[in-house]
Image (cartoon, rainbow, N blue to C red):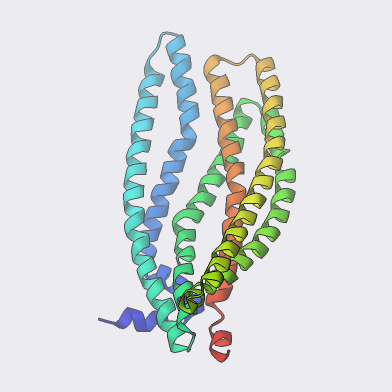
Amino acid sequence: MCAPTVEFAAAPPWTLRRVLARYWRRVLLTYGLFNLENLLRLAQPLVLAWAINDLLDGAQMGLWVFLAQHITYTAVGMCRRAYDTRVFTSIYADLATSVVAGQRAAGVETSRVAARSGLSRAFVDFFEHDVPMVVRAAYSIVGALVLLALFDPIVALFCLGLAGPVWLVNRAYGRKMLALNRGLHDELEREIDVIEGRRTDEIGGHYTAVGRWRVRLSDGEAVNFGIAELFILGLMAATLVRTCALGLSTGDTLAVFQYLLMFLTGVDSVPLLVQQLARLRDVGGRLGTVGDDARS
């Protein structure tokens, strides 16, 4: 009955991989549903353009196709969301058990084990939330670019022109987030020791320091957002001028701007993903430092 705990406790740095291997069928199914959901989402502006153009011409076929597409998209999304929670709750239970058992066996002090068992949730969050974010961003960016090129290759080139500045900005942002997350996690690992000390000034200083680290993370995100939005504003203005000059139908014009907004939504998710990857990188290092902590 206790076999899973013994199996996973033996190798803390590889626990998540082994837990995922155990649940690969469930994870594959939830990611399959998520890919289907995104394909249906990607088709929506195209189908909506069809419906608008048909209705303006006195036909209804496009409307019925649009209704069928959206009902299918909604059904798949509901099933995927309900299934996700069940899968990743099971994975987290195994991972947290493994982290606690492995680090206690190595002699790591209780306060650090408690902090790291909470931080281990970041790994499950990565697969439950961040991997889908990557997939959704990929569909939004690549899929929207392909479909924009079908309407007008020049607009697609405008979007590609945004890639260079975004990459440079997020490269610098990623380095900064790694350093800030390291400082935050150092402070969080002290939390139980500070509380056990029962000194009001030390407790207040700890939570003030945690707050400062979170504010610095938020400030970095705000600056990155502002810089990115300046580039996005230029892209939207150029696309507006270009689309109006093409003389597209009403439905096609709407589809172009929906795909443009889809592309920009994907680009907007990149900074959050960079921050989460920086956080996961630091957490992974902490969960893999059992030997150092035990010796200290």
Could you tell whether 127 is left or right of 283 in the image?
left
| Residue 217 shows in the view | yes
Could you tell whether 26 is left or right of 276 in the image?
left
Q: Residue furthest front?
A: 200
Could you tell whether 87 is left or right of 218 in the image?
left
Residue sitting at x 65%, y 20%? 243
**Corner quadrant of residue 74:** top left
Front-lying residue, 81 or 18? 81
Could you tell me residue 19's position as x and y percent? Answer: 40, 71
Q: Residue furthest bottom?
A: 295
Could you tell me residue 73's position as x and y percent? Answer: 38, 37
Q: Residue furthest top?
A: 58
Residue sitting at x 44%, y 75%? 114
Could you tell me residue 237's position as x and y percent? Answer: 70, 25
Residue sitting at x 49%, y 85%? 108
**Corner quadrant of residue 162:** top right
Give the number of marks. 0
Q: Residue furthest left?
A: 1
Quadrant where the image shows the C terminus? bottom right
**Position of 53 relative to 44 (above/below):** above
Could you tell me residue 276's position as x and y percent? Answer: 56, 58
| Residue 10 shows in the view | no
Quadrant where the image shows the N terminus? bottom left
